[in-house]
């Protein structure tokens, strides 16, 4: 619960510095500062970095990760984790791709992807809440089990020949904006509203902040967590159609390793891995930051084999900053 | 005594192992040959060595997801430093140091910053694998002097060399966990870390030792692996952490800490190795194996917690 801290500022201090201080205490503040600094550095180092088209390219590239991360954010805010999203994305893309080649259009593939994701997410949520199995074990197991399901369904072959009217969600433009970017920002607004203003959104913070207190206050802890896992499935389903549109085909390895980028986006943005503290804006900032860094190092000529290394270093840096900040502020959340 | 026997998880696991072996023997006539049983050990020693370290870590309510990536990093460190002209013995020392360093890195992050091992090792999962890819430039080194094969392919009589190393490691792990104060500390931290700290248990030092120790075991496994397949590649050990964690939780260690035994883990390793080997012999495609392994991990943890609750 980020806003709960009482102001501990000396009397007579100007109101401006107080509001700046409060802003700096927000979960996404360090990442936002870091993002601005980095964009300045890259725009000086690499010509053409700060142009509109390049920024749009970066946002389009991170759309799939960002959309899934918006939902995983809710799971992490609950104090849980979901590392099955890589295989889940692959599976959703396979079913959506099959629906696309069979029926075409946008509605049926989207429904197929979302339904697949929702089922997989419900299995995760069911095992975590009713099965009382730690989320890390459930989703680690599902990461492998779902990849197995992909291979069973496809028999190891690619899904190809995705019709153009399905691909529009991945490669279309509206008023000069790429559709993935539009979807990302729409879902961001939805999650910002849900997180701050819906009962479930508030319950998520309560469950992650102090599960015992939430239960004693009469919240349904299991229902809150279950819905968070299902939401991950639904958003992964939506993202899978964008993925499908951009790639034009689905390999059996589709989505491998995405789960790491998703978690990186969430924690780099400033949502605490311990739960209870974070925001939808943090995810958007985190995803953009990752996109900027990967794009920037590419512009600077760093070979792409170093991508995982950069990502790992980024996750560690983010969680260290979070830990140091928690210690300095004395916030146990 | 009877009551103890009835609830002994190790006995149940032994029964499961025998049942699986009988089923596999039905599926494939090659399964119950001595040659096959001993050859299976070539595969499970690498998992088994790491699982011993993981058992202690899981008993402290910790976890290490970076072991597969660590194996790739050590393998690349050995292979590519050798290819760059370093004599192989020195390259092997470098590999061991890399493993120790990687484990120490995890341990320092976890203890100094008081971070959850899950987050740290998820970060190093990407970091180590990325380092392996970067250093090797996604290439492979696969020509070594003949004597290097000794580590992963040698026989002492009919027994594979690494099996002897594993038996020694099991005995050491058993003594450490059940006969030393260090072992008591491990259980104490897992049961209640706060209480352990107040009772004077050096929690940080124990944890640092455990994560560094598993780094060493990963390095040993990596050298055996590299020798066995005589290739160093950045994508080796992919998904290894799942096999290892599966073996440990199957062996009865609780992911919530405080519970677990070396004997249980050894049986867990044997069950997984038998299952994998048997499924291969029976001609089950590897895609199904991943699926079954995923299901196996989830159900093992579920059954563990279910029975634990009933005992209480």
Image (cartoon, coloured by chain):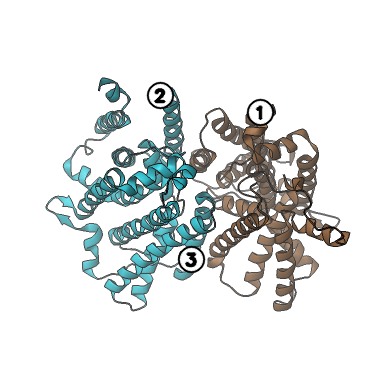
Chain colours: A brown, B cyan
| Residue A2 visible somewhere in the drawing | yes
Chain of the residue that carries numbered disc 2 in the rendered image: B
Marks 1 and 3 close (CB-CB < 8 Å): no
Q: Are marks 2 and 3 on the same chain?
A: yes
User: Is A149 placed left or right of A322 in the picture?
Assistant: left
Q: Mark 2 falls on what kind of element?
A: helix
Q: Which residue is mark 1?
A: A216
Number of residues whose C-alpha sits closer than 10 Å to that of mark 3, classed few (under 14), some (14–19) or many (20 or more): many
The residue under the point 22% across, 68% down is B146
Quadrant hosting residue B228: bottom left
User: Is A214 placed left or right of A191 in the picture?
Assistant: left
| Residue A113 visible somewhere in the drawing | no
Q: Position of residue A122 (x, y in %)?
A: 61, 32
Q: Position of residue A52 (x, y in %)?
A: 80, 66
Q: CA distance from mark 2 to mark 1?
A: 26 Å
Q: Which residue is mark 3?
A: B131
Q: Which residue is mark 2?
A: B311
Q: Farthest front residue?
A: A11
**Dot 2 or dot 3, earlier in sequence:** 3
The residue under the point 59% across, 35% down is A120
Number of residues whose C-alpha sits closer than 10 Å to that of mark 1, classed few (under 14), some (14–19) or many (20 or more): few
Q: Is residue B101 above or below residue A100?
A: below
Of tags 2 and 1, the one toward the viewer is 1
Q: Are marks 2 and 1 on the same chain?
A: no
Q: Nearer the viewer, residue A191 or A220?
A: A220
User: Is A55 placed left or right of B156 in the picture?
Assistant: right
Chain of the residue that carries numbered disc 3 in the rendered image: B
């Amino acid at each position: 619960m980020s806003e709960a801290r009482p102001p501990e500022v000396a009397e007579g201090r100007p109101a401006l510095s107080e509001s700046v201080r409060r802003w700096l205490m927000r979960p996404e503040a360090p990442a936002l500062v870091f993002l601005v600094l980095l964009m300045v550095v890259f725009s000086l180092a690499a010509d053409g970095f700060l142009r509109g088209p390049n920024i749009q390219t970066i946002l389009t590239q991170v759309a799939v990760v960002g959309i899934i991360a918006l939902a995983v954010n809710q799971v992490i805010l609950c104090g849980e984790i979901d590392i099955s999203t890589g295989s889940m994305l692959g599976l959703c893309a396979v079913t959506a791709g099959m629906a696309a080649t069979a029926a075409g259009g946008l509605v049926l593939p989207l429904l197929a992807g979302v339904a697949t994701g929702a089922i997989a997410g419900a299995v995760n949520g069911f095992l975590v809440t009713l099965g009382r199995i730690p989320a890390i074990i459930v989703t680690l197991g599902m990461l492998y089990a779902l990849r197995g399901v992909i291979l069973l369904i496809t028999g190891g072959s690619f899904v190809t020949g995705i019709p153009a009217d399905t691909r529009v969600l991945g490669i279309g433009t509206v008023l000069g904006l790429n559709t993935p970017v539009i979807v990302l920002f729409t879902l961001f607004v939805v999650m910002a509203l849900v997180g701050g203003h819906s009962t479930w959104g508030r319950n998520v913070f309560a469950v992650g902040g102090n599960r015992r207190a939430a239960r004693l206050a009469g919240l349904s802890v299991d229902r809150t967590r279950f819905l968070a896992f299902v939401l991950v499935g639904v958003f992964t389903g939506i993202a899978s159609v964008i993925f499908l549109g951009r790639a034009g085909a689905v390999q059996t390895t589709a989505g491998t390793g995405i789960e790491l980028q998703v978690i990186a986006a969430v924690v780099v943005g400033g949502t605490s891995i311990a739960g209870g503290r974070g925001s939808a804006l943090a995810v958007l900032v985190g995803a953009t930051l990752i996109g900027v860094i990967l794009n920037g190092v590419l512009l600077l000529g760093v070979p792409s084999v170093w991508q995982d290394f950069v990502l790992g270093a980024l996750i560690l840096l983010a969680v260290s900053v979070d830990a140091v900040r928690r210690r300095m502020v004395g916030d146990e959340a | 005594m009877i009551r103890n026997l009835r609830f002994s998880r190790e006995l149940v696991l032994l029964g499961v192992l025998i049942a699986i072996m009988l089923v596999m023997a039905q599926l494939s006539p090659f399964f119950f040959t001595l040659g096959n049983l001993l050859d299976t050990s070539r595969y499970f020693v690498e998992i088994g060595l790491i699982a011993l370290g993981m058992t202690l870590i899981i008993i402290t309510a910790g976890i290490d997801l970076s072991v597969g990536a660590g194996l790739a990093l050590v393998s690349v460190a050995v292979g590519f430093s050798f290819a760059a002209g370093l004599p192989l013995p020195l390259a092997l020392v470098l590999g061991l140091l890399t493993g120790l360093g990687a484990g120490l890195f995890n341990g320092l992050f976890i203890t100094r910053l008081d971070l959850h091992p899950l987050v740290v090792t998820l970060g190093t999962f990407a970091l180590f694998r990325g380092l392996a890819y970067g250093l090797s430039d996604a290439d492979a080194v696969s020509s070594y002097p003949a004597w290097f094969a000794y580590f992963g392919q040698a026989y002492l009589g009919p027994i594979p060399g690494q099996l002897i190393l594993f038996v020694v490691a099991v005995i050491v792990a058993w003594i450490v966990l059940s006969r030393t104060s260090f072992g008591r500390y491990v259980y104490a931290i897992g049961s209640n870390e706060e209480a352990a700290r107040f009772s004077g248990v050096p929690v940080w030092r124990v944890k640092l030792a455990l994560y560094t120790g598993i780094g060493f075991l990963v390095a040993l496994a990596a050298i055996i692996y590299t020798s066995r397949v005589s290739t160093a590649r950045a994508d080796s050990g992919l998904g290894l952490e799942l096999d290892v964690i599966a073996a440990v939780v199957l062996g009865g260690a609780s992911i919530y800490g405080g519970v677990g035994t070396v004997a249980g883990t050894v049986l867990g390793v044997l069950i997984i190795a038998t299952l994998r080997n048997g499924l291969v012999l029976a001609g089950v495609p590897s895609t199904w194996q991943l699926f079954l392994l995923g299901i196996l991990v989830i159900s093992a943890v579920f059954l563990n917690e279910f029975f634990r609750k009933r005992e209480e």
